[in-house]
Image (cartoon, coloured by chain):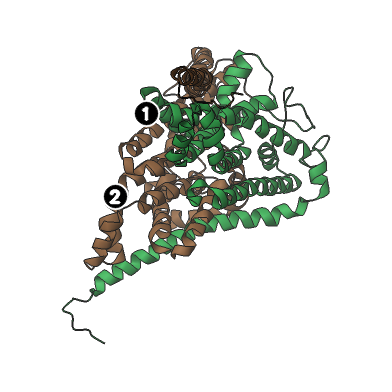
Amino acid sequence: MTVQTGIQPISATRRAKDRLVQALVYLAFALAVIPLVSVLWLVVKNGAGRFDMEFFTHSMRNIGARDAGGGAYHAIIGTLEQVLLASLIAVPIGLLTAVYLVEYGEGGRLSRIISFFVDVMTGVPSVVSGLFVLAFWILVLGMSFSGFAGALALSILMMPVVVRATEEMLRLVPRELREASYALGVPKWRTIVKVVLPTALPGIVTGVMLAVARVAGETAPLLLTVFVTDSINNDPFNGPQMGLPLYVFNQTILPTDVAVDRAWTGALTLILIVMLLNLVARLITWWRSPARRR
Amino acid sequence: MATPTRTTESGPALRRSAFRRSRGDGPFRFASTGAGVVLLAIMAAIGLFLVVKAVPALQANTSHFLTELTWQPNATKPVFGIGALAFGTVLSSLLALLIATPVAVGVALFISHYAPRRLASALGYVVDLLAAVPSVVYGLWGVTFLVPFMLGPSTFLNDYFGWIPLFSGESIVGKSMLTASLVLAIMILPIIAAISREVFLQAPKMQEEAALALGATRWEMIRTAVLPFGRPGVISAAMLGLGRAMGETIAVALIFPATFKISFQILGPYGNSIAANIANGFGEATEVGRGALIASGLVLFLITLLVNMAARFIIARRKEYARAAA
């Protein structure tokens, strides 16, 4: 059916080009999803084998590379402690820095410099933060390898993520809320603590959880600071610990099948923890972020 | 805790309230400024302490650090240099970038302009999940699945495209530069895609609609209205991805064959990177050996710093990208 409008129909070559690009764009998305599906499928398939009680209740003490059994209890404890300590260091510093950038910085020179270096810090390779803690904490100050040293390295990786997430949320808090508070005679710092931060809280929690999810899977900094142990060490301040990512790495480089099986189960556990953190974080944003409520 | 200030009509009460404000405000302002300064101090300390621990090892080195290829810092006469490692780091990251950028731009366009509106954000989340997978898991996946798998395609490339120097060589292996670059590409893809997506979404709607109204096809609209607007954003996204690829450690440490040879034969048993060498060499490093690894880490830090600063500079120049930069 032809419509008499005088408008030229789209030529065949132009239409073909349009279709071609559309096909390429769809293909690109498919290409991106293939590795994700492959990784998740293999992790679940190979990890399910050793996903048993022993894995979560035993360490690797007195278990050689060839022995079956053994578990990651010591690594899970280590990861939980290290990530918790890292959060305790990084969250207050990150939060306060974001408050400075949004509430006190006022676009001055210092705030622009800090803002720039927060961005640059996001790009610091994880292995470099590990080397820094190794050089500073262990070699210069003479401290031992410990879970806390690992937490220091992880906190450096967390800080910029927390700052950026918090900053973004604080900027979403409506100006009117602050002004209403000032008008009631509330000092600026109490306005921040009682009005601004609570309003932005869900978003901040999301940001912190994403930051935790990011560092929970980091291996390289732990390798250089926490060292490696096969035994349970509940004290993060004394002696080498283990971490779940480190456990996966350590079992992967062993040449036996039972060790690689343990690595897969470790990977499955790690992915479950990280994905869970991610999912919960996104759900919080989705439900309660100030951006959505406005 | 300060009690709410009761303001009266008289002047003195108002002044007292102002006084109280400054007294409570001081420490809080100080603490938040201090936190920002601590962040700057950490960045400075990273550079400083890496230099402090690298210098003794560099002095013990009996060869030239920047040009030497071998890495034997643990020997009685330490010989080590960054040459081969820096080459491997740059080559693998550039290859990864070459593979990842076109796919990432495609993914970004898919989510911003092609996918059904209702599905778009969910599909974007799927791509973001790629970034959530820890690097050690990619390493495990790479070494047990991708390395044996790549033997087929690599042999094919060598058989039919062996005349291209990159694909030439006698021995073809799975643990090659190409496999490592592929894993790196998968890991940086979500970063490039996420930033490109944000930039494409911010392309002026008016111009897009104008292009469509003038009879442009969807591709012509994207080419004339979206891509020119997004180009600087995509470039800086790619550079951020490059920085990430250079610093990536564990995944490539498991895949690289850890040789100290400069070779462009990306299918052969060659390849190493600064970060991978740190992870692999730390266990048996002596004191000089640790210093040498720290020195190599310093080089990595400086390279990534430059790449990231350049990328941030491009983003910061354009105010429209403010959201994408976060």
For the residues carrying marks 1 and 2, which lies nearer the camera in this image? 1
* Residue type beneath disc 1: Gly
Please state the horizontal and vertical placement of residue B86, each as a whole percent of the image: 44, 31
**Residue count near mark 2 (Cα–Cα under 10 Å), binned few <14, some 14–19, many ≥20:** some
Task: Identify the residue shown where x is 24% and y is 62%.
Answer: B211
Say whether residue B113 is left or right of residue A57: left
Q: Which hue is chain B drawn in?
A: brown
Label 1 – label 2 distance at C-alpha: 26 Å
Residue B99 makes an appearance in the image: yes
Say whether residue A106 is left or right of residue A146: left
Please state the horizontal and vertical placement of residue A216, each as a whole percent of the image: 63, 39
Q: Residue furthest front?
A: B9
Q: Are marks 1 and 2 in contact (CB under 8 Å)?
A: no
- As rendered, which of B242 and A213 lies closer to the eye? A213
Q: Find disc 1 in the rendering and name its residue.
A: A107
- As rendered, which of B56 and A285 lies closer to the eye? A285
Q: Find disc 2 in the rendering and name its residue.
A: B229
Q: Which hue is chain A drawn in?
A: green
Please state the horizontal and vertical placement of residue B13, each as a whole percent of the image: 49, 19
Q: Is residue B221 above or below residue B263?
A: below
Quarter of the image for residue A238 reads top right
